[in-house]
Image: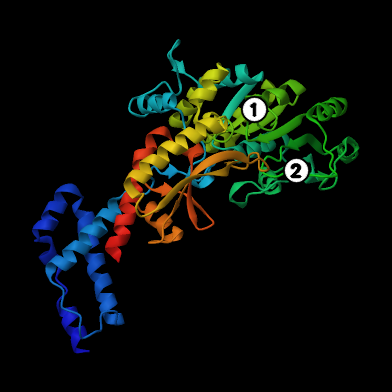
Amino acid sequence: MEIRKKLLSSIPAVDEVLKSRSIESLLEEYPRTVVTDSIREYLNEHRTEVLRGGFDNDNIKEPDIEYFVTGIIKKVEATMKHRLVSVINATGVILHTNLGRAVLSEEVNEMLIKIASRYSNLELELSTGERGSRYSHVEEHICRLTGAEAAMVVNNNAAAVLLVLSTMARDKEVVVSRGQLVEIGGSFRIPEVMEQSGAVLREVGATNKTHLRDYEGAVNEKTAALMKVHTSNYKICGFTKEVSSEELVELAAKLELPTIEDLGSGVLIDLTRYGLPYEPTVQSSIKAGIDIVTFSGDKMLGGPQAGIIAGKKHYIDKMRKNPLTRAFRIDKLTLAALEGTLRLYYDEEKAVESIPLLRMLTLTLEQLEHRAEELKRKLEAIIGKSCSVYVTDEFSEVGGGSMPMHKLPTKAVAIKTHSISADRLDSRLRAYKIPVITRISRDAMLLDIRTIMDDEYDTITEAFEWALMENQQEK
C-alpha cells in the first residue's frame, strides 16, 4: 500500500510535463491539442495501472519525469502515425483483398498525382464551357474495348448490381439459377443485394444443374429480366449444367425480356494465351447479346475499386436518372485511375507489361527463379549467419474471388531461424516501418516472388535485419 501511494504521488501534473524540453520539441512537430491530450491519457493510464496493483511491488522505483516523457512521446507518435500505409505483399496472393487488391500501374499513379493536386474538368465540357458528365471520361473507352453501346461507373460491383436491378426490376421478378447465388466479399450475398434493390428473386434449377427450360418455366407476367451470375469465387465440378449467355439471350428475345449478367471479376483479355484458365470476357458477353453486364474495376481489370456497367444505351440512360446513382457515384481519383487503366488496354502487349496484375499473372518460372535467387543473395549477405535461406517451389493464388481453383506455380524464398519462431518473425516484420506481409508453411517463412515488386528487395532485407536485431535486444 505504501509503494502504491509513492507511485501515485510521483505522477506529475500536465503543466509540469509540458515544461520538459523534450515535450517542447515535440510541440514544434505535432499539434498542441494532440500532445496535451496524449499527456492526460498517458498519465491517467499510468494512474489506473497503479491503482489496479500493476506496479505494487517493493522493488519498483518511483519513476522520474523522463520516464513519463518517454512514454508520452511514443504515444503522440503512435497517435499521429498514418493508419493506411504501403506494405510489401510477399504472400503470393495477387488480388489480396486485405492488402487493397489490384496495384495500379506507374502511368496511372503519375496521372493521379496530377489530378489530385490540381483542379480538373471533372464535370465540365471543355469544348462548350457547359456542365458535362463525369462518366464521359471513361464511357467511350469502355464502349470501344467491350463493344457496348453505353457505359457508366459506380463505386463497386455490388452497387452496380443493385443499381441495375433497382432500375430494371423494382417490384418485379428476376429469374436466376440457384447455383449462381454467390456470396461475395464481406459476407454480402447476391440474394440480399437483389432484395435491397426492390427486385424479387426467382430461383430456378438445382445447385449443380440448371436447364434453359427452368428459366422458361419460371417466367410469368411479373418477370422483369433473366439474370446470369458468373461464379468467379467458386466452382461446381462433376455432374453439372448451366445455360450459356447465348442460350439465355435467345430465350429472352423470344419472351421479350432483357438479360443481365454479373461477371464479377471483369476480364478484358483472353488469358488462355498466357497459359491461364479461360475466364469469360466482357466482350464475349456483350457479343452474345447480353443487355447489361456488370463487373469490378479492381479485380481482373487491374484498376481501382469500381463497379462498371456496360450494355444497351436505353437501359443505362434510365440508370443515370436513378437517385441511387448519386449515392453510388465515384470521385475524380477513381475516374482518373480507371481511365488510365482502360487506356492501356488498347495495346494488349503494353497492358500485360504495364498493369501489375497482368504482369504478375504472366511471369514465367524462369523469371521467377531469377528474381528469387537475387533476393536470396541479398538476404544471405545480411542474415545468412543466423538463418537458413533457400529457394523453394510453391504456388501463388489470383485471389479476390477470381480463378479459385487455379494454382500458379511460383518460386518463394524460404527463411528458417532457430533464434525466433516463424510466427514471431512474422509479427516483427509487420511492425517494420514498411510492413512486410508473408505466409508461413512448415515452420518456414515464405516470400513469394510473384507479388514482390522489383524495387522492394532492399526494403525486405532491411526489414529482416531490423526484425532479428529487435528480437536480440528483447532477449
Quarter of the image holding residue 283? top right
Task: Identify the residue at image location x=36%, y=28%.
Answer: 113
Q: How many marks?
A: 2
Quarter of the image holding residue 170? top right
Looking at this view, is 271 or 25 the one in front? Answer: 271
Element class at badge 1: helix
Q: Which residue is mark 1?
A: 271
Task: Identify the residue at image location x=61%, y=16%.
Answer: 144
The percent coordinates of residue 7 (x first, y second) are: 18, 79
Element class at badge 2: helix
Looking at this view, is 351 or 286 the one in front? Answer: 351
> What's under tag 1, amino acid-wise?
Leu
Pair 2/1: label in front: 1
Quarter holding the N terminus is: bottom left
Task: Locate residue 81 relative to residue 351 in the image: left or right.
Answer: left
Task: Locate residue 366 relative to residue 163 in the image: left or right.
Answer: left
Residue 92 sits above or below residue 310 on the image: below
Looking at this view, is 231 or 307 the one in front? Answer: 231
- For disc 1, the neighbor class at 10 Å (few under 14, some 14 to 19, many from 20) is some
> What's under tag 2, amino acid-wise?
Gln
Task: Identify the residue at image location x=19%, y=85%.
Answer: 3
Task: Locate residue 273 relative to residue 338 in the image: left or right.
Answer: right
Task: Identify the residue at image location x=75%, y=36%.
Answer: 228
Residue 302 sits above or below residue 133 on the image: below
Residue found at the very far bottom of the displayed protein: 1
Residue found at the very far front of the displayed protein: 385
Looking at this view, is 372 or 2 the one in front? Answer: 372
Residue 363 sits above or below residue 64 on the image: above
The colouring scheme, among rainbow, by chain, secondary structure or one colour, is rainbow
The percent coordinates of residue 9 (x first, y second) are: 15, 79
Residue 208 in view = yes
Q: Which residue is mark 2?
A: 180
